[in-house]
Image (cartoon, rainbow, N blue to C red):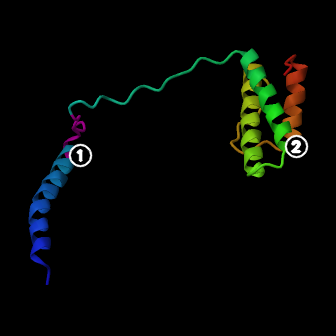
Amino acid sequence: MLSPLVWYAALCVGPAAAFALLERGARAWTGADPIRRPGVSAPPAPVVRPPRPIELLADDLGRLRDELARLRRSGGYARRHHMLAAALAYDDALRDCCRALDVPVEMTSAPLDPVERLRLEAELEAAGLTW
């Protein structure tokens, strides 16, 4: 047997839930736009950033290379985690430089293998980029 409090809650919430479902069903059936709540605006349009200058990208590569070298020498806490984060950031900066200089590169989210990383670094140096 359900307690009177549960019955009271069901009687209070039930009709509101039923009307909400009916309204959603009617809107879906008629193809009406969803209700806009007062004070809530439409989601903002995505921001398209202009490409960064190659000089800044090269500076990023240099900083990240130095950070990787520092992490290799250190024995600090969570070294492996920091090495992976720095390597992923370095790979992203390397891909950004490749895109800026029209060097072909695979767009994967996984870290680059060392051979691919070395190939991209050599191609960027051949294109005249120093960092």
Q: x, y (%) of residue 123?
A: 87, 26
Tell how many labels: 2
Residue bearing the label numbered 1: 28
- Given this view, does label 1 or label 2 mark the residue nearer the observer? 2
**What's the residue type where badge 2 is placed?**
Arg
Q: Earlier in the sequence, mark 1 or mark 2?
A: 1
Q: Which residues are magenta?
A: 29-37
**What's the residue type where badge 1 is placed?**
Ala
Q: Secondary structure at mark 2?
A: helix
Residue drawn at 79 percent across, 25 percent down = 103
Q: Is residue 81 left or right of residue 18?
A: right
Q: Is residue 71 left or right of residue 26?
A: right
Q: Quadrant of the N terminus?
A: bottom left
Residue drawn at 56 percent across, 20 percent down = 49
Choose between 85 and 48: the one closer to the eye. Answer: 85
Q: x, y (%) of residue 32?
A: 21, 38
**Mark drawn on residue 122:** none
Q: Residue 116: which quarter of the image?
A: top right
Choose between 65 and 118: the one closer to the eye. Answer: 65
**Is most of the magenta stretch helix, strand or loop?**
loop
Residue 118 visible to the viewer: yes
**Mark drawn on residue 73:** 2
Q: x, y (%) of residue 20?
A: 17, 51
